[in-house]
Image (cartoon, rainbow, N blue to C red):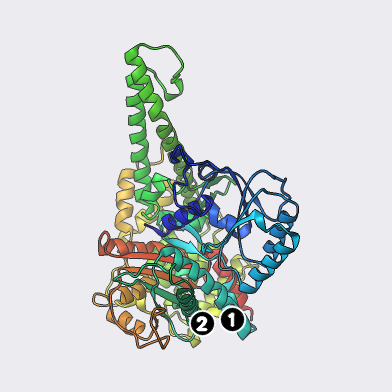
Amino acid sequence: MSLRSKQIQSLERMLHLNQDGQPDLTLASKTEEIIWKALVLDKKSQSIVSSVLRVNDLLRCGITIHQLITTSRSPLPDAPAIYFVEPTKENILLIIEDLRHDTYDQLFINFTASIDRELLESFAKEVSLIGKSHKIKQVFDQYLNFIVTEPNLFSLDYHHIFTKFNHPTTTEDDINGLANDLSNGLLSLILTAGDIPIIRCQRNGPAEFIAQQLDTKLRDYLSNTKNLAPPVVSKRSVMVIMDRNIDLSSMFHHSWIYQCMISDVFNLKRNTITLPDGKNYDIDPKDFFWSKNSQLPFPDVVENANLELETYKHDAQQLTAKTGITSLNDIDPSAPHSTSDTVKMQQAVDALPELTARKATLDMHMDVLASLLKELESKSLDKFFEVETNYNNPKITTEFMDLLNDQPKKDNIIDKLRTFIILFLVCDLPQTYIVEVKAKFQQLDPSLDLSCLQYFEKFKNISRLSSLARDDEGSDDSININNNSALFNNLSSRLYGLTEGKLSEGLSSLTSGLKKLLPQKKNLPLTNIVEAIMDPTNANSGSVQLTDDYLYLDPKSRGGHSKPPKRQSYDEALVFVVGGGNYLEYQNLQEFVVEKGEGVKSVVYGSSNIMSAVDFLQECNSLGKL
């Protein structure tokens, strides 16, 4: 089961009043009593639930109404209420007010994480004083304090963590508080995943603080809940905790991967895509097209969209042919028919919901793809991908300067800055060239904030840049710019204007040419580290030597909390980046899993927050001003 499946399973059990049985009312046995309930959430739990469950899913679990705990709510004195909220003093006071005013008949209280003992005792005392303890039927710690947006992608939803950990005014108490919050989130993740892992982490930084606190919390949990602890498994999983500074450049990359492009070009927050025209699309966990195409290169997605559309048209045509009608819209199940016609009509009616849902999904992705094409053309996004892919080409400084001087139809100054940041971080650029580029940026847009470059300069001076993604820099696996420049120069104009129905018209030759342009698959620094820990025998020797220095913590061990690192292989890994993550790293890790073979490895990836390049740029600008 994926992490998302496990979280959905836990949420559905909670909505079934934490009882074993079938939470789906459509499958409930005739003897099972159906209880309709209200669901009360706070902002954090609303984010957790809305990322994996839709309104119809809640209704299927017996939830007829869901509301925020901070809003004015009409009393439902005959209905039970499920509370799913963070264990805060503010939420406790609001629950007590509901009790005092008999807002609900019965209260089933679920906290997103473990409630502090002192706060729990205070809660119990207040409930006793108002004489309503009989109304509280359950109090559960759910350990679900994380957001899942993809099968194996999670976020703890803590913002500005990179800035806070790297800001000189951040105190030791602040650091301990941040480490406590993040380790609590990881505790929830681990308990939902169902296995207590070995912990490996970078030393001397935020990752180590969090790992040590997490180790302590897991030990306390195991000692306090011996009967509830997950079953012992023969082979342990591993949790790898890293600081964002292991690789900053990946946060700024442009990508041809469908999911990454949507996150980069549009706004993708908790599975909701916001297009430039303000249109919003929700990605349902059951979205068949997204499941198959989100991690594929853009040309493949365009081809697959056309194939799926043709398949839909064929299926719809076959269905209408059987019934003798010209369109699915003409199906009228109430009209009189002969016996044989009735059977055919029933088959059509049965197939209609699936076909209608499939068409709606394809229409959504056709619109998203068309919008991507427009942005691609107006901002010349293909050129940034080209430069970033060829960072080690001797002519790259000239290529970038040409790109900097290029005048697109739509402002892309931030895209230009992102590409320069990557070159600044991974290349040894001459100081005269850096000064020239800065001056050109100021000329193009005097209001452009370049403070981030000051931060990166400090970073390069005090840190050793990770070379994991460039281990074999001597070998030229980059794209031959000269051979493919013609394709790139014409790509945007040839794609622009293609809309639904014409999206892949004439694209067969173009996409095949574009596929040749796509770079050879290559691990990002983070993936190299994960591989070195999970599969040291087959990993790059430099990566293995680097990870040999990582701290080793085993929450199940007795005595000392740490012991010398031990090289061993793992089939399952939880990967956490302190200070921001992105879809590019998630996709690269899943690609690594696929290359190892089906069912051989499993990797869950997450961060304090899944961020866009623009959001991370703002954090770096703020640090550069110090």
Task: Name the residue that disc number 1 marks.
Answer: 175
Q: Which label was assigned to residue 15?
A: none
Spot occupied by residue 610 in the image (x, y as percentages of width and height): 51, 64
- Quarter where residue 564 is shown: bottom left
Secondary structure of residue under mark 2: helix
In the rendered image of this protein, does residue 387 appear above or below residue 381? below
The x and y percentages for residue 278 are 60, 47
Establish if 117 lies above or below 58: below
Q: Amino acid at mark 1?
A: Ile
**What residue do we see at 44% from left, 56% from top?**
4
Nearer the observer, 418 or 112: 112
Relative horizontal placement of residue 266, taking residue 88 as reference (left or right): left
Q: What's under tag 2, amino acid-wise? A: Phe
Q: CA distance from mark 2 to mark 1?
A: 8 Å
Q: Which residue is mark 2?
A: 209
Residue 351: % across, % down: 38, 29
Q: Which of 55 and 10 lies nearest the eye of the viewer?
A: 10
Q: Quadrant of the C terminus?
A: bottom right
The answer to whether residue 594 shows anywhere in this view is: yes
Left or right: residue 512 compared with residue 76: left
> Looking at the image, can residue 379 be seen?
no
First-in-chain label (2 vs 1): 1
The quadrant the N terminus occupies is bottom left
Task: Specify few, some or many for label 1: CA neighbours under 10 Å numbering under 14, 14-19, or 20 or more.
Answer: some
x, y percentage for residue 330? Answer: 45, 20
Is residue 564 shown above or below 325?
below
Choose top left, top right, bottom left or bottom right for residue 163.
Answer: bottom right
Tell me the SS state at disc 1.
Answer: helix
The answer to whether mark 2 and mark 1 are in CB contact below 8 A is yes
At x 32% / y 69%, what residue is drawn? 233
